[in-house]
Amino acid sequence: MTAGERAVVRRIAAECLCYPEGPDPMPPQLAALLGPVRHAAAAPLRTFLDRAGGLPPGELSRHYVEVFDFRQRHSLHLSWWTDGDTRRRGEALLRFKTVYRAHALEFSDEDLPDFLPAVLEFTAATGDDTLLREHRPALELLRLALTEHGTPYADVLAAVCATLPGPSPKDRAAALALARSGPPREEVGLDALTPYGHLGLLPVLTDSP
């Protein structure tokens, strides 16, 4: 997959994961950019756009609210997956801002800097996929959670994950193993909580009996 193709997939995925303001999941001129992309990562996005475009007016907006606004276990904020609502999350959010500033960019206060559509737009514009790679386990856990929920938005996450190196974990256990295998983090002054340790409290992420 070329750098240009990855940028297109990520830019379109960012648009798909924002609240749909109108009847279409995205502007037609943006969706048209996906046409020349032949990589397999584009296929899930085409599937999502076909399904979303066939919904009655207002249905996609209603579905978005149901999937994302009322279900924290489908959070689009990447640091929630690593740090939950612990004090450590502030440090994680600062990391996002630091990466943005390295490219002379400042994040607006309209949302948190770890909001996935914003991270995808940043990555598409700069080619710096550091934040996506650092939060690969979060992306995979979100993908699996959306897949279990049965929402077309799972296709969007599948496309995003396919732009990163290596195969995606096949199940939750493998995704959690990927999370636990990440680099150790200094916990000075904070509770010694394991990253992703709070996920066992979520029904969607607990192992099936």
Image (cartoon, helix red, strand yellow):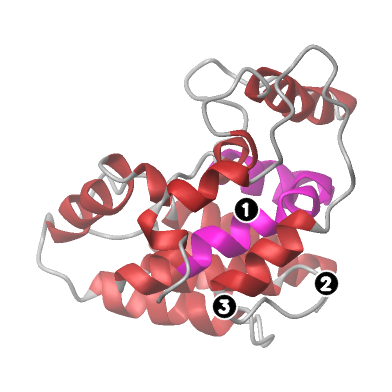
Which residue is at a point 43% across and 69% down the rendered structure image?
154
> What's the mark number on residue 165?
2
Front residue of 149 and 60: 149
Q: Against 130, is 180 above or below?
A: below
Let me know if residue 160 appears in the view: yes
Q: Amino acid at mark 3?
A: Asp
Q: Earlier in the sequence, mark 1 or mark 2?
A: 1
Q: CA separation, marks 1 and 2? A: 15 Å
**Residue 97 x, y percent position in the rendering:** 74, 23
Label 2 secondary element: loop
Mark 1–mark 3 contact, CB under 8 Å? Answer: no
Q: Amino acid at mark 1?
A: Ala
> Which mark's residue is nearer the viewer, 2 or 3?
3
Q: In the rendered structure, does residue 38 fall within the stretch colored magenta? A: no
Q: Against 92, is 196 above or below?
A: below
Q: CA separation, marks 2 and 3? A: 18 Å
Q: Against 58, is 113 above or below?
A: above
Q: Against 23, is 93 above or below?
A: above
